[in-house]
Amino acid sequence: MNISLFAARWNPYLAGALTGILAILSVAVTTIAIDKTMYLGASTTFVRAAGYVEQTVIPDNVATNEYLKKNSPKVDWQMMVVIGIFVGALISARLGRSAKLETVPPIWKERFGTSATLRGVGAFIGGMILMFGARLADGCPSGHGLSGNMQLAVSGLLALVFFMVGGIITAHLLYKK
Amino acid sequence: MDLFLGLVTGILFGFFLQKGEVLRFEKQVGFMLLKDMTIIKFMLTAVLVGMVGIYALNGFGVISLSIKSANVGALIIGGLLFGIGWAIAGFCPGTSVGALAEGRVHVIWAIAGMVVGAAIFAEAYPLLQRTVLTWGAYGKVTLPQVLGISPWLVIVVFIIVGLSAFRIFEKKGL
């Protein structure tokens, strides 16, 4: 098994196991060092990001909306995790020379053609729906899928099952010929 | 200090996600078409390793759990909506920023959509709080609590199920 930092890919079981260890260490270290127990997650950061955007155009709404007050626009631990994911993926892709410029992915191209505009519209609409769903479910594959299931949470298992059911049905309808 | 810890954790997480090849549209949609189990191998292994460590540390009293409420109605409707959007976008929130870093530039539209989706949810929140979020709200419960058994028994079952699934994936070359 190649686990060189310069390898283009690692076995997914290995990368997953290391992520499991990272999640455990993160929970332990944050508890000890900052007296807060932080579990991996990502989607709350997008609410804070929306708050930042709204502050520039409709600041009053950020001050009055209950959900934006609860998840106010600020840089917190989780937002740094999300920024870190970008940095970590960038380093990994550089070292492994595995970055690839992609405007339309192959599966999409086969079904909907080569238009980058159509792909952009699809990505945007999909992103909108999935984030609305993630906030309603109170988490995404990181917060529910990884962190929730590690804690054997009923919510984590239910969320992951319905993420998959929705995804599998939709993907078959969209991409299967 | 917490910002620094978040950044370090994120960098390692992003590194593992990229090396595991789970950031890609092809891998995410490949799973949803049941043709490629890469993202499940990654996620399930992380969960199996994580649950052992989390419950060991919790057992020794080093850490506490942080359980999200089992709002069954919101989890079903929100979960299904997430799945629908996930299939169209081909990325999830955590992987989207990493996908951008490895050159999948179309993900920028998915990220923009996610920010808009979060803003729409914030507007709908008061209404949802009175309706969907009250449907089947069972509180912050875990599987061992609901089943009335030791968490370690649940963990053993998960490990057996997980390893069986991995065997099938490898046998079928998924």
Image: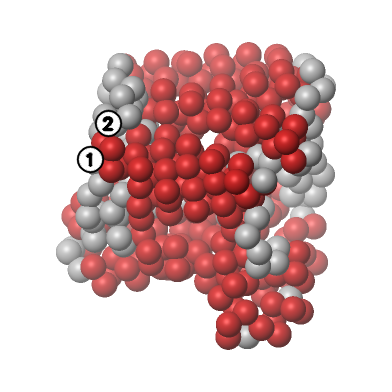
Crowd band around label 1 with a 10 angstrom C-alpha radius: few (<14), some (14–19), many (20+): some
Residue appearing at x 41%, y 23% in the figure: A14
Q: Which residue is mark 2?
A: A6
Residue situated in front as seen by the camera: A123 or A84 = A84
Looking at the picture, which amino acid does disc 1 mark? Answer: Arg
Residue appearing at x 62%, y 72% in the figure: A51
Chain on which label 2 sits? A
Instruction: Point out residue A37 in the picture as x, y percentages from the top left corner.
Output: 73, 38
Looking at the picture, which amino acid does disc 2 mark? Answer: Phe
Q: Is residue B110 above or below residue A90?
A: below
The CA distance from mark 2 to mark 1 is 8 Å
From where the camera sits, is residue A149 visible? no
Chain on which label 1 sits? A
The reply to whether callout 2 and callout 1 are in contact (CB within 8 Å) is: yes
Q: Which residue is mark 1?
A: A97
Say yes or no: labels 2 and 1 on the same chain.
yes
Q: Earlier in the sequence, mark 2 or mark 1?
A: 2
Residue situated in front as seen by the camera: A24 or B47 = A24
Residue appearing at x 77%, y 55% in the figure: B135
Which image quarter is the C terminus of chain B in? top left
From where the camera sits, is residue B113 visible? yes
Q: Is residue B61 above or below residue A6?
A: above
